[in-house]
Amino acid sequence: MDLLIIAGVDIAHVRLVDLTLLADQAKPFYEWVETRFQSTLTSPETLNVILNTASLQDIRNGIVSCYQPHERSDLPFLFDGIGRTYPHTKACYYFFSWIIRDAPQQRLAPLIQKVVKRTQTSRIDVEIDVLSRLIAHYRVHVRNFTWEVVREVIIDRLEGSRRSLKGHEKEAVVRTALLAAIQAYYDRHKTYGIYAGIEIPDAQIMLENESYDVSVNLLSPNGDILRRMLVSIKTRETEGGGHSHLFTRDILSAIRAVRQNGSDNFLVTVIAAKNWSEREAETLKKSVDHLVLFDLAPGEFTHFDTSAQIELNTFMANVFDGLVVPVSANE
């Protein structure tokens, strides 16, 4: 657990570690926006230079190209404070809102809706017009749209988002790690490997009466779900022994229920518990596609350490490259 002690007082800001990790996963989206503007305006300049010098019409054209890309797969994504991804058009709205105006949902959205009603224009057209005008009007004050500056803005926006989404702390930790693994692959390849795209649902899903806190839909070119990655998060104040055995038995029962009903999904389990039985851990490893086990009490589980993140990155890369398939019910 990350401690920063002065005179017996812990002044650590553990949440900042997770928020910065999450903010860093927005860089592929920033770079994608930059590429869209460069392509649309046939300009070699950086996004920072373009937004500071382009005409209002050119800014509008650049934003339109982001909202309405010709390709609909292999798009990067943006997310809220607990790592839930936004649909693409909403991601564009939040991205451009964040860099030029605060509170896009609470303050700007109602104003946009008023314009929609008064002009009888589509919501997206009004959003694009409003965002381009805001950037052109206020860029002289903002001045800087580099990734380093935008990253700081995103950290602030994510922290505000997380405060409004109480009760999702452990889910946020796992989503952040999962996003980091996905984005690490996307950053290298600009694709999702053998899959045309991905979706990360913003809520738990239920299969065979078992809930999965986090899931990833792995998509075909026409947007169909080819298979899912189902992630269950288990935290217990346990000291091992019989507790870990009973806990493992419950997990295995849920796994078998899904496997035996023809599921072709990847199953990932994340456990945070003290002194977990090594024997029980080995049993679980043979039954799930990827197991992450932290020897931590739930209150100490605040982020994936370097080793766990590297292992998750490798697993996700193997999934995207088609080098692994889900464990079968008979294994």
Image (cartoon, rainbow, N blue to C red):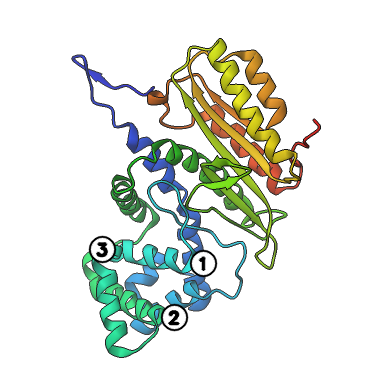
Q: Nearer the viewer, mark 2 or mark 1?
A: 2
Q: Looking at the image, which residue sits at the far right?
A: 330
Of the numbered discs 1 and 3, the one sitting upstream in the chain is 1
Q: CA distance from mark 2 to mark 1?
A: 13 Å
x and y percentages locating residue 12 in the rendered image: 28, 27
Of the numbered discs 2 and 1, the one sitting upstream in the chain is 1
Q: Which residue is mark 1?
A: 35
Q: Looking at the image, which residue sits at the far bottom?
A: 119
Name the disc covering residue 61, or none: 2
Q: Which quadrant holds residue 192?
A: bottom right
Q: Are marks 1 and 3 in contact (CB under 8 Å)?
A: no
Q: Is residue 199 above or below residue 281?
A: below
Q: Nearer the viewer, mark 1 or mark 3?
A: 3
Q: CA distance from mark 3 to mark 2?
A: 26 Å
Q: Is residue 310 left or right of residue 127?
A: right
Nearer to us in this view, 80 or 185: 80
Q: Amino acid at mark 1?
A: Thr
x and y percentages locating residue 136 in the rendered image: 29, 76
Mark 2 secondary-structure assignment: helix
Q: Is residue 289 visible?
A: no
Q: Which residue is mark 3?
A: 106
Q: Amino acid at mark 2?
A: Asn
Q: Amino acid at mark 3?
A: Gln
Indicate the quadrant containing the C terminus: top left, top right, bottom left or bottom right. top right
Q: Looking at the image, which residue sits at the far top?
A: 241
Q: Nearer the viewer, mark 3 or mark 2?
A: 3
Mark 1 secondary-structure assignment: helix
x and y percentages locating residue 29 in the rendered image: 48, 59
Residue drawn at x 40%, y 48% as measured from the top left: 23
